[in-house]
Image (cartoon, coloured by chain):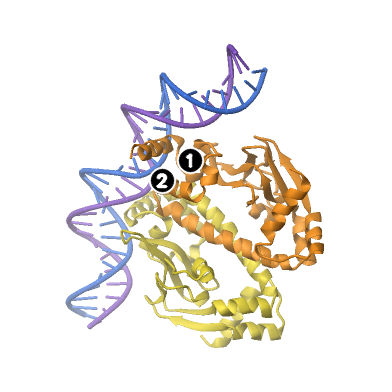
Chain colours: A yellow, B orange, C blue, D purple
Amino acid sequence: MNFKESHQLILDNVSRFIDLTELEKQKYISLLTEINVKKKGFLMQAGEVAKYEYFITKGCLKVYTLDENGAPHISMFAIEDYWTGDLSSFMTREPSRYFIKATEHSELLGISRANYDLLFQEIPKFEKFYRTLYQKSLISYIRRSNHGISLTAEERYVNFKKKYPQIVHRITQKDLAGYLGITPEFMSKIISKINRM
Amino acid sequence: MNFKESHQLILDNVSRFIDLTELEKQKYISLLTEINVKKKGFLMQAGEVAKYEYFITKGCLKVYTLDENGAPHISMFAIEDYWTGDLSSFMTREPSRYFIKATEHSELLGISRANYDLLFQEIPKFEKFYRTLYQKSLISYIRRSNHGISLTAEERYVNFKKKYPQIVHRITQKDLAGYLGITPEFMSKIISKINRM
DNA sequence: AAAAAAAAATGAACTAGTTTAAGACTTTTA
DNA sequence: TAAAAGTCTTAAACTAGTTCATTTTTTTTT
């Protein structure tokens, strides 16, 4: 993918919430860093401080932690036109507990913490962009955290398939089980139960 | 509580993230509505569109839904100096699925949707305030949604007690069980197990 | 295209959490 | 201040989800 296409994608994403002049667009693009990760490559590993917040222009990634037994817990999947990163570590500058790994060759645009801070000074409109972006994310995480404790594994699986049909076929069942908080064995049972119906 | 005290409390909360002039403070206060709810009273009920986002100056409230079996699932508790409401319904103007009920006599300041929109026009600094507030909330909801699926009930209980010691003794065990996504009976077992250790 | 590695399916034995029911304790209401 | 209503505890029987072990299928590497 050439630079122009990925820039157009992020500008379209931003323009859902704010309007930018040509000059502001150029300024914004100049604050971003192009990043490529090959399949199975890491964008970030636990122990590091999150250097960037990422916008995905191509590919698919998973964000996960390892618990004290070494078992992975997947926090999110991210594909084209999604934002990802470890917002907590990015803001506090404390070491992250997350890994971000590409499940396909992926291309991203990253904004560093210094440029993120600069962005608000240079183009204050971005306060509105992030206010709106975080507001929308917050709404879906509030829903997700309620569902996590009040729905059964089967309900969560059915919900995920309905809500993210574009993601389901790009990830392994094992990873989806990790995201839903169940074992791959139990998820296999859920699937065969659903197929039998 | 007299008006001045509650106004001071919300202005202190806002000034954690932005600085306001005296004039801006007055303008902001003028956009807020004073609301009182007595113990067991409802601030909002499922089926209604959320009219306000609320800041609590005194008291304690619980936000919950009822599932298809009529069982309550508690989404959050809110006490003094917290913000609450149903952000999703407030933004989309679609009917809410939540109830907000006072567990003690409570006093709040509400901002209506019209005034919320006006606020950004009149005092653009509030974009930054909400950007920062939502950013912080998002970080804790991301954590909560991960914990909901990856921790055991006992771990979630211990976490809650450690993180919100001020709230634990103001709510019933039954409500805390509803928040943690377990039955009151099982929570009772967890507590007696912990006490025996 | 073969060999190696990882993912998926299946089943049996297990454990965390639920359900139902009953009695003791506490808070609310009249 | 008595009665009623709600909360908390305990326990036995149950179910959703886990663990461990084995085989089959798919994907990756050479």
Depth check, front residue: B159 or A34: B159
Proximity of marks 1 and 2: CB atoms separated by less than 8 Å: no
Q: Taking B178 as reference, is A53 above or below it? A: below
Q: Amino acid at mark 2?
A: Ala
Residue A58, given in percent of the width and then of the height, sits at 49, 77
Q: Residues within 10 Å of mark 1 (few under 14, many from 20)?
A: many
Q: Taking D7 as reference, is A154 above or below it? A: below
Q: Taking A37 as reference, is C22 above or below it? A: above
Q: Taking A149 as reference, is A18 above or below it? A: below
Residue A182, given in percent of the width and then of the height, sits at 38, 54
Q: Amino acid at mark 1?
A: Ala
Q: Earlier in the sequence, mark 1 or mark 2?
A: 2
Is residue A132 at least partly visible in the picture?
no
Check disc 2 and report the residue beneath it.
B153
Q: Chain of mark 1?
A: B
Q: What secondary structure is found at the residue carrying circle 1?
A: helix
- Residue B177's disc is 1
Side of B136 relative to D19 (left or right): right
What's the CA distance linking mark 1 and mark 2? 9 Å
The quarter holding residue A81 reads bottom right
Side of B85 relative to D20 (left or right): right
- Residue A57's disc is none
Q: What secondary structure is found at the residue carrying circle 2?
A: helix
Is residue B106 at least partly visible in the picture?
yes
Residue A134, given in percent of the width and then of the height, sits at 60, 64
Residue A103, given in percent of the width and then of the height, sits at 40, 72
Depth check, front residue: A83 or B41: B41
